[in-house]
Amino acid sequence: MTEMSRVAKRPVYLGAGGRLVGDVVKKSDTLDYGDKATNDNVVATHYMSKLEFELYDTLRKPGISVQRAGTDVVVILVRDAIMELNVAEISETGDDTLNKIARLLKKYDATFIEIAGYTDAMRDANAAHVLSLDMAQRVGVHLSRNKVGTARMFIVGRGSARPIAAQDNVGRLTNRRVELRLAPAR
């Protein structure tokens, strides 16, 4: 999640009853000394590493990966792993996967969630943007139906930006994805 969206999201999140990582994690006595920013980073890193390990253990399926990016955790959901092949609907296996993710996001509720949709390189950039936004919104709606707070979510469609694979037949399937970037609320 970009720093600007994190700063813009924080007042909305706190106004909706959201919690910060520092409020959730019990700080040990060793963190009473030293720089506050360093201590906050240690607490956030510990909180997010626990979330990362639980996500990794829960989501061991093809087409799904859990990665670490600093203090953020990124869950990459390839479109074919969560949606029907030629229909813009969430599949049964995708429903199961998103339910597991929602359960963990309710448990680790001191996080912001950026839901970003991506497509492969299409001829029409506007169509790619609309398709990517639609995929991200479907995931966001599914999470909100499972009682994940919408004040925590930031939904964006990025079209064909940031490909993670080549633009051949196999790579195109990989580039059609939804990424959940989970950032600690501090």
Image (tube, rainbow, N blue to C red):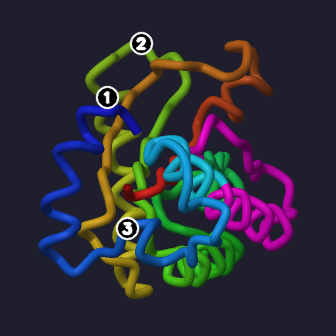
Give SS at disc 2: loop
Does 162 sit left or right of 74 as displayed?
left
From the image, tell me which residue sits under label 2: 123
Q: For mark 1, what is the residue?
A: 127
Where residue 131 sits: x, y (%)?
Answer: 37, 40
Where, by quadrant of the figure, is residue 22 drawn?
A: bottom left
**Proximity of marks 2 and 1: CB atoms separated by less than 8 Å:** yes
Which residue sits at x=81%, y=61%?
56
Residue stretch in magenta: 46-72
Give the number of the mark in front: 3 or 1: 3
Compared to 171, does 104 lie above or below? below
Taking depth in this image into account, of 154 and 50 the one nearest to the observer is 50
Quarter of the view holding residue 174: top right
- Is residue 151 part of the magenta span, yes or no? no
Q: Amino acid at mark 2?
A: Arg
SS of the residue at dot 3? loop
Residue 20: numbered disc: 3
Q: Amino acid at mark 3?
A: Leu
